[in-house]
Amino acid sequence: MKEQFAILPRLPIVGTLKLTSYDGKTLSSITVVKKQKATERNSMFEHCFKEIQNYLNGSSHELDIELDLSHLTKFQTKVMDEMKKIPYGSVASYKDLAVSMNSKGYQAIGTACGKNPFLLIYPCHRVVGSNDLGGFAHGIAMKKKLLELESTFH
């Protein structure tokens, strides 16, 4: 199927987002992009936009968006499932995720978090190092702001 996308410009904390879908019904990715022109949004993209806005303004703690996970590996899916279990306003370490998955692959878990195609839906910003914030594909400043947002509305 042909890629469809919508640009959500200048959102608080996360900036401009690109939402991608291949079937027009399920979301395939959310990525942070540099300046791009806004696009027309079909009903699925409009629903995603409202869910993201509600999350960022603190009126919702979860995003109810149907996802296309077919492009993820089994390991990535398992990591995403474990991330999803981290409660809003809380954090877990890469080691915590590894233990819950019966894995010793902390670095592999960190890599899967870094390749998370669903910013905010699978809360990779809630995964931290044992002694620090760890990494974040979109920069530590955004990770801190997302954690602050969640602690404010928790």
Image (cartoon, helix red, strand yellow):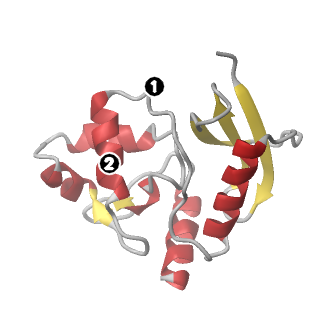
Q: Is residue 63 above or below residue 112?
A: below
| Residue at mark 1 | 71
Q: Residue furthest top?
A: 1
Determine whether the residue tagged by mark 2 lies in a helix, strand or loop.
Answer: helix
Q: Position of residue 19 (x, y in %)?
A: 68, 40
Q: Position of residue 145 (x, y in %)?
A: 58, 69
Disc 2 to disc 1, C-alpha distance: 15 Å
Question: Who is closer to the viewer here, 45 or 78?
Answer: 45
Earlier along the polypeptide chain: callout 2 or callout 1? 1
Amino acid type assigned to the residue bearing label 1 in the image: His
Which mark, residue 145?
none
Task: Report the side of 95 relative to 67 (left or right).
Answer: left
Label 2 neighbour load within 10 Å: few <14, some 14-19, many 20+: some
Task: Report the side of 103 relative to 75 (left or right).
Answer: left
Determine whether the residue tagged by mark 1 lies in a helix, strand or loop.
Answer: loop
Amino acid type assigned to the residue bearing label 2 in the image: Asp
Which mark, residue 81?
2
**Residue 85 picture quarter:** bottom left
Residue at screen point 51% across, 75% down: 150
Question: Who is closer to the viewer here, 28 or 9?
Answer: 28
Question: Who is closer to the viewer here, 60 or 103?
Answer: 60
Residue at screen point 73% across, 28% down: 4
